[in-house]
Image: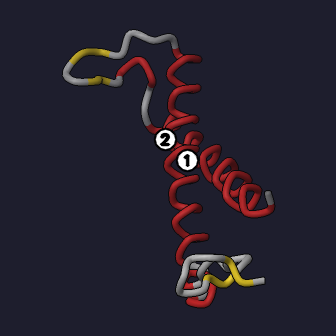
Amino acid sequence: MQRLIWILWPSFVVAGIAEAVFFTLIDPQELYLFGEPVAFSRIATYSIGFFAFWALCAASSTFTCFIQRSSREINRRARRPFARTPGGLPEV
């Protein structure tokens, strides 16, 4: 749960900043998608833009959490509750 907060909260803040900067420079009604003008309202374009920025920033934060792990965490194997004997029966 803590890693989820480490990922989502900073990405939310950065997405808000990115959206403010992006839509300060670009008018939502002048955007084109696949050669066609975007037919959404300004509010819908702002919302879609925010969630797109948030997803991109969350992916970046997730990757950062992934590469922050130590080699011990990455190479840790699941421990088995019982050791198996050569015959296949569990040893207690």
Residue 19, placed above or below residue 84: above
Residue 65, placed above or below residue 76: above
- Name the quadrant of the N terminus: bottom right
Residue 59, placed above or below residue 43: below
Expressed as whole percent of the image width and height from the top left, the position of residue 46 reads 55, 26
Element type at marker 2? helix
Residue at 29% across, 23% down: 32
Q: Which numbered tag is attached to residue 18?
A: 1
Residue 51, placed above or below residue 81: above
Q: Amino acid at mark 2?
A: Phe
Residue at 63% across, 76% down: 89
Residue 27 horizontal side relative to residue 43, left or right = left
Expressed as whole percent of the image width and height from the top left, the position of residue 5 reads 76, 56
Pick whichever, 40 or 58, lies toward us: 58
Asked whether the residues under the numbered discs 2 and 1 touch, taking CB atoms below 8 Å apart as contact, a structural biologist would say yes
Element type at marker 1? helix
Expressed as whole percent of the image width and height from the top left, the position of residue 45 reads 50, 22
Pick whichever, 73 or 48, lies toward us: 73
Residue at 80% across, 62% down: 2
Q: Amino acid at mark 1?
A: Ala
Instruction: Work out which residue is located at the far left of the displayed protein and give it.
Output: 35
Q: How many marks?
A: 2
**Crowd rating for badge 1 (residues with CA inside 10 Å; few <14, some 14–19, many 20+):** some
Provide the residue designation for mark 2. 22
Q: CA distance from mark 2 to mark 1?
A: 6 Å
Choose top left, top right, bottom left or bottom right for residue 83.
bottom right
**Crowd rating for badge 2 (residues with CA inside 10 Å; few <14, some 14–19, many 20+):** some
- Name the quadrant of the C terminus: bottom right
Expressed as whole percent of the image width and height from the top left, the position of residue 17 reads 62, 48
